[in-house]
Image (tube, rainbow, N blue to C red):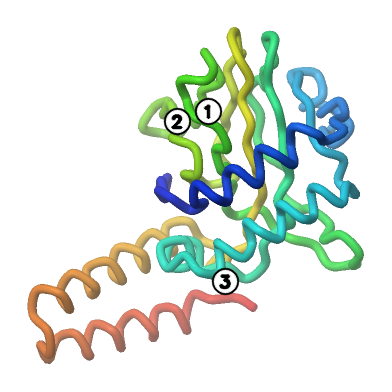
């Protein structure tokens, strides 16, 4: 399931991000790429140990915790600390699939990449190119969202960032391990939850709300892995 979440970051959040990133020390993005991905990756990233990356990552994690749409869609168990990248001057990232596992910083625990997440940090008119292209059985989906918006998509998908031919593209990216490993089951639960919310608005107090909520939680109980 691919889902756009508008307005994860406010205008004030974005201003703070842009100010911090403008004075950041960037490194070659290939430093964090696997052997195959390094051959198709050409961008800049904040070093993983950068205090500025942690500061901005904590801001994004805080906003995620306050975002009901993200929680309903991702059913997050663990979220890898957000990373930050910059594309300019033809920078690109060719077709690839994200690693299945990432070590949680400062821990021996791993995060399984069920869901890939990108938060756009500047406006689409500030750069040409730079589309995120996600491929699935239904074809290729092009994503280039307003600043502050986020997109989620299955980490098992082939995807790429097309060359930035003018300006600069700034984004945060990270991975989420879901309580529900199956993408199909997550989609079913999200659609059921959305239907319950609509029914609650249209027919408050309807007896079916409690019944459907029970079905939702019984499915979540059956499908979740902690």
Instruction: Give the answer, above or below, for where 127 lies relative to 184.
Output: above
Quote the CA–CA distance across marks 1 and 3.
26 Å
Question: Residue at 80% across / 55% down in the picture?
Answer: 54
Q: Residues within 10 Å of mark 3 (few under 14, many from 20)?
A: some
- Determine whether, in the image, residue 193 is placed left or right of residue 24: left
User: Circle 3 is placed at which residue position?
Assistant: 179
Mark 1 or mark 2: name the one nearer the start of the chain. 1
Quote the CA–CA distance across marks 2 and 3.
26 Å
Q: Secondary structure at mark 3?
A: loop
Question: Residue at 43% across / 26% down in the picture?
Answer: 142
In x, y percent, where is residue 172? 65, 42
Q: Secondary structure at mark 2?
A: strand
Question: Residue at 50% across / 62% down in the picture?
Answer: 74
Instruction: Give the answer, above or below, for where 57 lies relative to 37.
Output: below
Q: Residues within 10 Å of mark 2 (few under 14, many from 20)?
A: some
Q: Secondary structure at mark 1?
A: strand
* Number of numbered labels in the structure image: 3
Quote the CA–CA distance across marks 1 and 2.
5 Å
In x, y percent, where is residue 23? 81, 34
Instruction: Give the answer, above or below, for where 142 lies relative to 213.
Output: above
Mark 1 or mark 3: name the one nearer the start of the chain. 1
Q: Are marks 1 and 2 in contact (CB under 8 Å)?
A: yes
Q: Are marks 2 and 3 in contact (CB under 8 Å)?
A: no
In x, y percent, where is residue 153? 50, 45
Quadrant location of residue 122? Answer: top right
User: Circle 2 is placed at which residue position?
Assistant: 143
Question: Residue at 43% across / 50% down in the picture?
Answer: 7
User: Circle 1 is placed at which residue position?
Assistant: 132
In x, y percent, where is residue 181? 56, 63
Quadrant location of residue 86? Answer: top right
- Determine whether, in the image, residue 190 is placed left or right of residue 167: left
């Amino acid at each position: 399931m691919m889902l756009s979440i508008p307005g994860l970051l406010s205008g004030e959040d974005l201003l703070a991000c842009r100010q911090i990133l403008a004075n950041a020390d960037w490194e070659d993005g290939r430093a964090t790429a696997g052997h195959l991905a390094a051959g198709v990756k050409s961008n800049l990233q904040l070093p993983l140990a950068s205090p500025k990356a942690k500061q901005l990552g904590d801001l994004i994690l805080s906003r995620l915790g306050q975002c009901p749409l993200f929680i309903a869609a991702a059913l997050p168990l663990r979220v890898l600390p957000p990373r930050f990248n910059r594309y300019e001057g033809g920078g690109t990232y060719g077709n690839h699939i994200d690693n299945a596992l990432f070590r949680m910083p400062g821990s021996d625990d791993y995060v399984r990449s069920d869901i890939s997440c990108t938060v756009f940090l500047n406006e689409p008119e500030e750069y040409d190119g730079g589309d995120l292209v996600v491929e699935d059985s239904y074809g290729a989906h092009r994503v280039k969202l307003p600043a502050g918006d986020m997109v989620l998509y299955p980490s098992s998908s082939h995807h790429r960032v097309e060359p930035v031919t003018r300006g600069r593209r700034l984004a945060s990216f990270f991975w989420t391990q879901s309580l529900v490993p199956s993408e199909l089951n997550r989609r079913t639960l999200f659609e059921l939850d959305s239907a319950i919310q609509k029914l609650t608005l249209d027919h408050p107090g309807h007896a079916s709300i409690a019944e459907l909520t029970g079905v939702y939680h019984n499915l979540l109980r059956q499908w979740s892995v902690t």
